[in-house]
Image: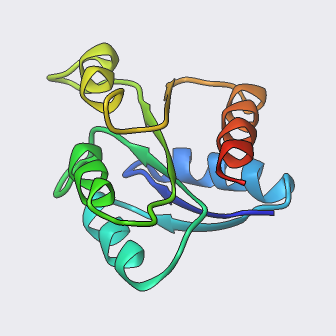
Amino acid sequence: MAKILLIDDMKGVRRTVSAVLKRAGHIVTEADDGDAGLHLLKCERFDLVITDMLMPKLDGIEVLLFLEQQPDRPRVLAISGGGSQVSADEAFMLARSKADATLAKPFDNSELLAAVDKLLKVAA
């Protein structure tokens, strides 16, 4: 069981991903944008952060840049389906150098759980 922070501006994505992770036995905290996610990261310790790359206010790159400065940072899974101005590939080009793994939306439950399990095993 891991403590996971899920940052995504899309409520449906948060609800679905959170439910899958909770069924797998994880404790999930949700944030609806990068700003809220950074606030939680400053107050709590997480084993894994799952962050969308494209969000209003503060995006996933800013979350990754913050985490990069932390001495004991959690593992990070960057997710994206692209946006109106940026493709998923463009979003992931930036994420690949800073995140531990990436996952393109839409993904199925088994892909999500496999990525999470792999990252948590590396962190253990």
Identify the image quadrant of residue 27: bottom right
* Nearer the observer, 108 or 12: 108
Up/down of 116 relative to 40, above or below: above
User: Quadrant of residue 23 in the image?
Assistant: bottom right
118 sits to left or right of 80: right
In the image, taking residue 49 as reference, residue 33 lies left or right, namely left
What residue is drawn where x is 40% and y is 25%? Answer: 81
Tell whether 116 sits left or right of 49. right
**Residue 99: image location, x then y, percent:** 40, 38
The x, y position of residue 51, in whole percent, is 42, 48
Colour mapping = rainbow
For the residue pair 77 and 71, the one nearer the viewer reads as 71
- With respect to residue 77, does 18 lie above or below? below
Looking at the image, is 73 positioned above or below residue 114? below
Which residue lies at the image location 61% right of the left edge and 54% below the top edge? 15
Q: Position of residue 91 (x, y in %)?
A: 27, 26
Which residue sits at x=23%, y=48%? Answer: 59
Residue at the farthest front position: 71
